């Protein structure tokens, strides 16, 4: 097979992998969520012939609030800035510091590869991975870990608000108690909310900023309950108590999903890591045998094909073990 045919084959595999990745990463949850919100908004409209102006006004307020939330969810599809992603990960560094750290890591890895006389293409790939991909993976990991820690203690924070409101304390005082008593990162988020309320920010705006800093479904539910209660009235302690029960049910469901999918995830991890691990061992034990992949043009094409098909397989396995809850 000639070089031209190999290039055409590699390009074909690349497009197939891209298509599979787009299918694996596609998600219809946003459309379904918008449809559920629209259904709730329609069902909350005034009842025909009810003859209760107060009830109709309250339903209209709830409908308007749900429409605003739907519009906000549509606007939140924009990818957050690096500054916001750093805040969501709980890091106090600036984007400039992040770029400096990433560039330093890439240059250090590139220098080490050149020092040990590795092939130029491999050195550039390792430097690019260490300077661009790896820092963003670390940032995503820190963000996910912080969101998980927040979710674990969020239901307890809502219980404190419920007990405080039932005892006669105002909502602001209940939020202050949460900021003092609950561990981080819940305490930090509620402390920001309390400080925002002190300088004149409305509760709705403060909850919106809280969601921007901690973009989880639990915070979204909390913001919806608090916003609707502030605009239309009602029993806040009962609504928050029901929300706390819902959050605990979601946590139990997540634990059940993890237990049921643990075997599939372990199998996917073993299958995905086996080829790179075997290739590394062969390279360490028989370097001359493997160096042809990094010195010959045909070897580059073979590596590209392997990377494409491995990526496609990983995306497909990730889709198979991904459970929405």
Image (cartoon, rainbow, N blue to C red):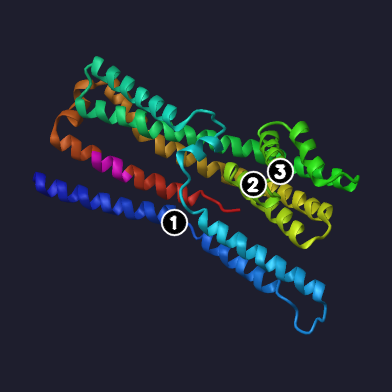
Q: Which residue is labeled 3 in the image?
A: 197
Whether the residues at callouts 3 and 1 have beta carbons within 8 Å, the answer is no
The one of 84 and 265 positioned closer to us in this rendering? 84
Question: Where residue 30 appears, x then y in whole percent?
Answer: 53, 59
Is 179 part of what is drawn in magenta?
A: no
Cα distance between the residues tagged 3 and 2: 33 Å
Quarter of the figure with residue 151: top right
Circle 3 SS class: helix
Task: Point out which mark residue 240 bears.
Answer: none
Q: CA distance from mark 3 to mark 1?
A: 39 Å
15 lies left or right of 241: left
Residue at image coords 46%, 48%: 79
Element type where label 1 sits in the image: loop
Front disc: 1 or 2: 1
Task: Find residue 26 and name its label.
Answer: 1
Q: Mark 3 and 2 residues: CB-CB less than 8 Å, in contact?
A: no
Q: Which residues are magenta?
A: 304-309
Residues under numbered marks 1 and 2 in contact, where contact means CB atoms less than 8 Å apart:
no
> Which secondary structure type mostly characterizes the magenta part of the structure?
helix
Q: Is residue 309 left or right of residue 221?
A: left
Q: Residue at x 85, y 47 (%)?
A: 165
Q: Residues within 10 Å of mark 1 (few under 14, many from 20)?
A: few
Q: Which is nearer the N-term, disc 3 or disc 2? A: 3
């Amino acid at each position: 097979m000639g070089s031209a045919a190999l290039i055409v084959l590699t390009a074909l595999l690349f497009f197939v992998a891209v298509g599979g990745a787009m299918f694996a990463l596609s998600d219809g949850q946003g459309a379904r969520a918008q449809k559920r919100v629209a259904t709730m908004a329609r069902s909350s409209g005034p009842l025909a012939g009810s003859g209760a102006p107060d009830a109709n006004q309250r339903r209209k307020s709830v409908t308007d609030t749900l429409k605003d939330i739907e519009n906000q969810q549509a606007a939140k599809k924009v990818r957050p800035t690096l500054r916001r992603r750093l805040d969501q990960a709980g890091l106090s560094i600036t984007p400039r510091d992040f770029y400096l750290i990433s560039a330093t890591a890439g240059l250090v890895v590139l220098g080490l590869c050149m020092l040990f006389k590795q092939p130029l293409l491999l050195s550039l790939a390792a430097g690019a991975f260490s300077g661009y991909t790896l820092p963003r993976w670390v940032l995503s990991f820190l963000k996910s870990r912080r969101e998980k820690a927040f979710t674990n203690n969020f239901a307890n924070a809502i219980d404190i608000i419920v007990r405080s409101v039932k005892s006669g304390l105002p909502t602001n005082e209940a939020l202050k108690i949460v900021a003092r008593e609950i561990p981080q990162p819940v305490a930090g988020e509620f402390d920001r909310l309390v400080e925002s309320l002190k300088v004149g920010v409305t509760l709705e705006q403060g909850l919106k900023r809280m969601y921007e800093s901690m973009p989880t479904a639990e915070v979204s539910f909390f913001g919806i309950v608090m916003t609707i209660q502030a605009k239309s009235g009602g029993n806040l302690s009962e609504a928050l108590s029901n929300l706390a029960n819902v959050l605990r049910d979601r946590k139990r469901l997540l634990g059940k999903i993890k237990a049921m999918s643990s075997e599939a995830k372990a199998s996917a991890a073993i299958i995905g890591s086996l080829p790179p691990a075997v290739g590394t061992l062969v390279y360490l034990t028989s370097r001359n045998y493997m160096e042809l992949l990094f010195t010959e043009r045909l070897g580059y094409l073979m590596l590209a094909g392997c990377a494409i098909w491995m990526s496609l397989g990983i995306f497909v396995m990730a889709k198979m073990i991904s459970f929405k809850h």
